[in-house]
Amino acid sequence: MNDYQQKISELKNEKNALILAHFYQTLDIQEISDFVGDSFALAKKAREAKEQVIVLCGVRFMAESAKILNPTKTVLLPAPDAGCPMADMIEPEDVIKLKERYPEAAVVCYVNSAAAVKAVSDICCTSSSAERIVRSLPNKQIIFIPDKNLGSYIASLVPDKEFILFEGCCPTHNRVSEKDVIAAKKQHPDALVLAHPECRPEVLRYADYIGSTAGILKAAEQSDAKEFIIGTEITIADKLTQELPNKTFYPMTNSFLCPNMKKTRISDVIYSLENMVYEIVLDDEEIQAAAASLERMVSI
Ligand code: 13P
Ligand code: SF4
């Protein structure tokens, strides 16, 4: 155990803390965490946590979801400025207007959104649960917010529903173009393409597998193929390279990076735990309103 690991283990005992990390966190953060997962698994873990303190190594909406699902716990976000630009693309007023326009529709809200937006939605989803959640709803019309790319992918899987999409997107995934995927395939013609549904539809057209971060990791592990082009944040390719040394992983482009997910450093985790700072504070009304749509998601 190195000095950092020793310090974190002491702090975890002293504060009764659980450290959760998203797969896009740097590998050294993943190594010092108690659990690493996709956003669905992180929400479930946070909801079940018995420890008094949850340290969320990820971005703000993930830490907010942890607080909403387990409100008596202290939730810390060690990199307090780690936001998600997609979550900032939609306001509660946008949702209210859409609901007025389509009163029969159910509002399905991707968890990559602020608590106030979840509060005016009917149900939340993650990339790994979106299809299941949409299928579970009796409504024919679905207002899908805020990710137009995930929304249009789910719409293609559930053609009997009518989708009203919002114009939001993940800048990291949306920046990758059809040209990028064609170039990667040309360079690595034997590689399978594994892509996240936050990618553009014209990129997903080339994918052999489409799924969440956890889904991509599992697909790579279970496949008999030896080479893969990874169509999501670059750390997934690094993680796979480390974990499956007999297979080769190429990022779809070298610029596939989420700057916000890279803001957490080990020293930030130590600082926030030591000083109990960068706590997520939401008002009770907001927690209660957002809890309904998040609870529906985890219970389906
Ligand atoms: P998942 O972990 O649910 O695949 O989501 C990816 C993501 O963009 C989180 O910000
Ligand atoms: Fe937000 Fe995209 Fe970064 Fe995920 S990868 S946190 S959706 S900007």
Image (cartoon, grey):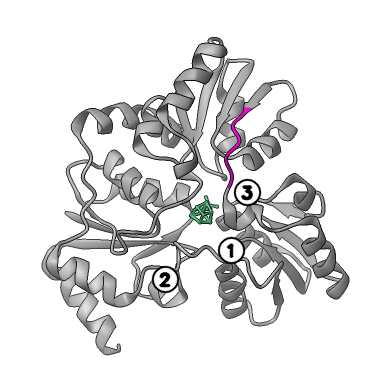
Image quarter where the N terminus lies is bottom left
Which comes before the other along the chain, label 1 or label 2?
A: 2
Find residue 292 and name its label.
Answer: none
Which comes before the other along the chain, label 3 or label 2?
A: 2
Alpha-carbon distance for marks 3 and 2? 22 Å
Main SS, magenta residues: loop
Asked whether residue 243 is in view, the answer is: yes
Position of residue 127 measured from the top left corner of the image (x, y, whole percent): 57, 44
The residue labelled by disc 3 is 198
Check residue 167 for magenta coloring. yes
Q: Amino acid at mark 3?
A: Glu
Which comes before the other along the chain, label 1 or label 3?
A: 3
The residue labelled by disc 2 is 30
Q: Nearer the viewer, mark 3 or mark 2?
A: 3
In the shown orientation, is residue 77 left or right of residue 141? left
Q: Is ligand 2 within 8 Å of the beta carbon of the residue shown at mark 1? A: yes
Asked whether residue 112 is in view, the answer is: no
Dividing the picture into quarters, in which one does residue 230 lie? bottom right
Q: Amino acid at mark 2?
A: Gln
The residue labelled by disc 1 is 233
Q: Nearer the viewer, mark 1 or mark 2?
A: 1
Q: Is ligand 1 within 8 Å of the beta carbon of the residue shown at mark 3? A: yes
Q: Amino acid at mark 1?
A: Glu
- Magenta residues, as a range? 165-169
Mark 2 crowd level (few <14, some 14–19, many ≥20, 10 Å Cα): many
